[in-house]
Amino acid sequence: MKKELRIKKNKEFQEVFNKGKSFANRQFVVYVLKKPGQDTFRIGLSVSKKIGNAVVRNQIKRLIRQSFHELYEHVHTGNDYVIIARKPAAEMGMEEVKKSLSHVLRVARVLKKTHAGNNGDY
């Protein structure tokens, strides 16, 4: 995931938390903030120390980034997303993370409609 597609500054995280809407499932909380003048979307990741050590936290972040990379063309642009991982995410593999993230993004109504040929993954 390109660096310009990431939210890094605390001020930007706080803006998404305060002005955005949140959607959740058991594994993830996603905050969505509409940014009309923005051409692409940006994501910020938050994984608490309660979830595990640095190795586990970094692995979860890598899996989330890879999932977003695979869902790139299906995610609405012009939004900022902050994804907070919950404890069950620590035991998930790549396919489970992607499925769970696509579920919560569908709940948030930020995934574009896809045709029936995609096995219903999105």
Image: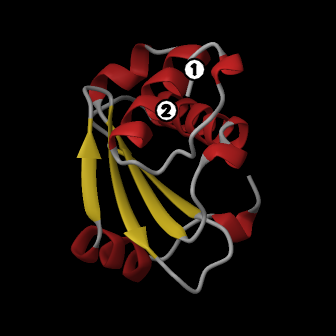
Q: For the point 71% across and 42% down, which residue is it?
A: 69
**Residue 56: image location, x then y, percent:** 49, 27
**Residue 110: image location, x then y, percent:** 46, 51
**Residue 41: image location, x then y, percent:** 60, 65
Q: Residue furthest bottom?
A: 37
Residue 113's label in the rendered image is none
Vertical relation: 40 (above or below) 50: below
Which one is nearer the viewer's eye here, 30 or 39?
A: 39
For residue 107, side relative to residue 97 (left or right): left
Residue position for label 1: 121
Q: Residue furthest front?
A: 116
Sequence-first tag of 1 and 2:
2
Disc 2 element: helix
Q: Residue furthest right?
A: 2
**Residue 51: image location, x then y, percent:** 32, 31
Q: CA distance from mark 1 to mark 2?
A: 8 Å
Q: Amino acid at mark 1?
A: Asp
Can you tell which quarter of the image residue 25 is in? top left
Q: For the point 35% across and 47% down, which residue is it?
A: 108
Is mark 1 in CB contact (under 8 Å) with mark 2?
A: yes
Residue position for label 2: 102
For residue 19, side relative to residue 54 (left or right): left
For residue 77, side relative to residue 73 (left or right): left
Which one is nearer the viewer's eye here, 117 or 102?
A: 117
Quadrant occupied by the C terminus: top right
Which one is nearer the viewer's eye here, 96 or 36?
A: 36
Vertical relation: 18 (above or below) 41: below
Q: For the point 50% across and 24% down, which residue is it?
A: 97
Q: Amino acid at mark 2?
A: Ser
Disc 1 element: loop
Q: For the point 46% across and 59% down, which residue is it?
A: 81
Q: Say few, some or many: other residues with alpha carbon within 10 Å of mark 2 (under 14 / 14 to 19 / 20 or more).
A: many
